[in-house]
Image: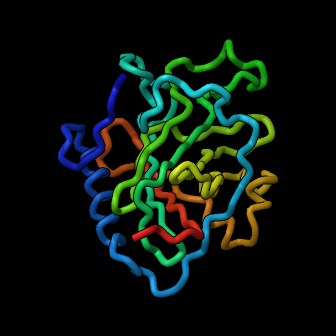
Amino acid sequence: MKSMVIHPGATVPTSRRGFLRRLSLGAALFAAPGAFAEELLRTPRLTEGPFYPDKLPLDTDNDLLIVNNSLTPAVGEVTWVSGRVLDSRGDPMRSALVEIWQCDAKGVYLHSGNFGGHEQQDKNFQGYGRFLTGSTGEYVFRTIKPVPYPGRTPHIHYKVKRRGQELLTTQCFIKGYPANEKDGIWRGAGDDRARAAVTVDFAPIKDSRTGELAAHFDLILGATPEI
């Protein structure tokens, strides 16, 4: 099974190396306990939906573009999604398991009941990944920019677990996407501040030779990490 290296010293293309270095520096800035004087707005809880994988793939790492040791990447706009898992005081949460899942570029989930679209499924897209946070609470995934499908605006599903307990289930949306306003789940996230907390920029990575994107999505929980 493949293993994705994510530390800044890894041998990766320049744009990825720069992105991961910025991620590391940003995490260090916010790693100090009590970095925020006021309580942060907690990430709204949103529905898990019907397509959490009913059978996890053999490959569950944080690189959703490559399945096992395949040489063929998934179809879609390559996107690095990163952030931190924090409590409401801004303290990082160590050993939190961050899971993401999303449909492929054709709108098909890794699930036995996804609209009967298995024949169109991108077999090179992992569809699900997970990442265990370290002392800074940071996580990172390489995936594709989410796409719409009938009835839903583009989104990525998130779940955070720790020591076997589910702490948060939510979704991440694309800032400025026109269909957000018509999406019942996005509208139901709460007031403007709550919706803004689950809506982020998917911006081009500077100097990327392949047009990669980056999105930063922090997950703010109500639980306080153990010292």
x and y percentages locating residue 50 in the rendered image: 76, 37
In screen coordinates, is 124 left or right of 12? right
Q: Quick one: which residue is furthest to the bottom in this view?
A: 37
Q: Residue at x 44, y 57 (%)?
A: 83
Please name whichever residue, 112 or 226, is drawn nearer the observer in this view of the structure.
226
Q: From what the image shows, is residue 96 above or below residue 69?
A: below
Please name whichever residue, 35 or 199, is drawn nearer the observer in this view of the structure.
35
Total labels: the figure holds 0
x and y percentages locating residue 41 in the rendered image: 60, 74
Please name whichever residue, 95 or 219, is drawn nearer the observer in this view of the structure.
95
x and y percentages locating residue 28 in the rendered image: 29, 67
Q: Residue at x 26, y 51 (%)?
A: 18
Residue 54: name its quadrant.
top right
- Examine the rendering and report whether any part of residue 41 can be seen: yes
Assign the C terminus to one quadrant of the image: bottom left
In screen coordinates, is 154 left or right of 65? right
x and y percentages locating residue 128 in the rendered image: 54, 34
Q: Residue at x 63, y 33 (%)?
A: 103
In screen coordinates, is 61 left or right of 23? right
Q: Quick one: which residue is furthest to the top in this view?
A: 119
Scheme of image coloration? rainbow
Q: From what the image shows, is residue 175 above or below residue 87?
A: above
Assign the N terminus to one quadrant of the image: top left
Residue 2: name its quadrant.
top left
In screen coordinates, is 50 left or right of 175? right
- Examine the rendering and report whether any part of residue 106 can be seen: no
Q: Residue at x 55, y 43 (%)?
A: 100
Please name whichever residue, 41 or 108, is drawn nearer the observer in this view of the structure.
41
Q: From what the image shows, is residue 101 above or below residue 214?
A: above
